[in-house]
Image: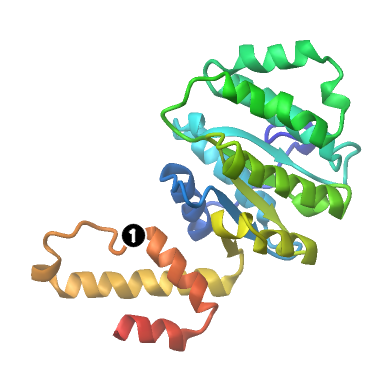
Amino acid sequence: AMHDSSARDPPPRCHPDTRKAALDTIDTFVEEPDPDKTVMWMNAPFGHGKSAVIQTAIETLRASGRGHRVAGGFFFGRDKEGRDKAHYLLPAILYQVAHNIPGMYEHVNNAINADPILPSKSLEAQFIPLLVVPFLHHPTSTHTPTVFIDGLDECDTPAAQCSILKLIADVVSIHRIPLQFVVASRPEVHITRSFKMSPLSSITRSFKLDDDFWCMKDYFRKEFDKIYESRPDEMSATSQPWPSDKVVWDLADRASGQYLFASTIINF
């Protein structure tokens, strides 16, 4: 289902002033595309609020006049019939792409008119005609919009989940389609394995939606801010935030909740 689908009404959302670090991380990924890291994987066990974070991220982008940054979104779920079927993913995404990316409607419409039963075919059969071909006929965009996929682990089978990840890898690493992907799921063994395999392993930023990660991220930011403020002369030519959010994100991920590692970095 899409982020504004009646099947999810009312959708889960983050409470005001919560999950700020997670939302900021996604916002930075969307706003500052890195050609070497075009996929983000947010993982956490059941009940950690992944869907609320993705929903809020999309709504925040749209509400702040940055809807053009959102190519589309799809929320898998086993509570409603059809929401767990892999073959609904691409048609739903392409419907949104056609309306969200200027000039894409004609190309998507042509693909469907050429084969009206495409939406009912397998994910693999849909991939080239529904996604690759329309983008090949579309002029290069000045920005790289993001596709949000939530609840990947709730797609009908592990094989289908892995197929979706393979298609994502093909989109950005083989066909070089100007899209980014934010994927949210539980850290199931087969999903984790897929993200650790090439090419996803080299193009993905991963983070756990848990307190350890965010506490560590906040720790690094506060300590670096102290260093910045304590050395006004040395930092006068350096703009904030220092260091960048991407650097802080990488350090928090590497620390894995170990404050000894974090304090060593700060004291160095």
Q: Please tell me which residue is depicted at 78% across the width and 47% down the height of the picture.
A: 163
Nearer to us in this view, 97 or 221: 97
Secondary structure category for the residue under label 1: loop
Q: Please tell me which residue is depicted at 63% across the width and 15% down the height of the picture.
A: 107
Q: Which residue of the protein is positioned furthest toward the front in this rendering?
A: 174
Residue 178 horizontal/vertical position (percent): 52, 34
| Quarter assignment of residue 209 | bottom right
Q: Height in image: 95 above or below 171? A: above
Q: Height in image: 265 above or below 185? A: below
Colour pattern: rainbow
Q: Which residue of the protein is positioned furthest toward the right in this rendering?
A: 81
Residue 194 horizontal/vertical position (percent): 72, 59
Residue 42 horizontal/vertical position (percent): 62, 57
Regarding residue 215, the answer to whether it shows in the image is no
216 on left or right of 129: left
Nearer to us in this view, 216 or 201: 201
- State the residue position of label 1: 244
Quadrant holding the C terminus: bottom left
132 on left or right of 162: left
Q: Height in image: 1 above or below 157? A: above
| Quarter assignment of residue 241 | bottom left
Quadrant holding the N terminus: top right
Residue 227 horizontal/vertical position (percent): 23, 75
252 on left or right of 91: left
Alpha-carbon neighbours of circle 1 within 10 Å: few (<14), some, or many (≥20)? few
Q: Which residue of the protein is positioned furthest toward the left in this rendering?
A: 233
Q: Please tell me which residue is depicted at 63% across the width and 39% down the height of the picture.
A: 171
The type of residue carrying mark 1 is: Ser
| Quarter assignment of residue 204 | bottom right
Q: Height in image: 246 above or below 217? A: above
Q: Which residue of the protein is positioned furthest toward the bottom in this rendering?
A: 260
Regarding residue 7, the answer to whether it shows in the image is yes
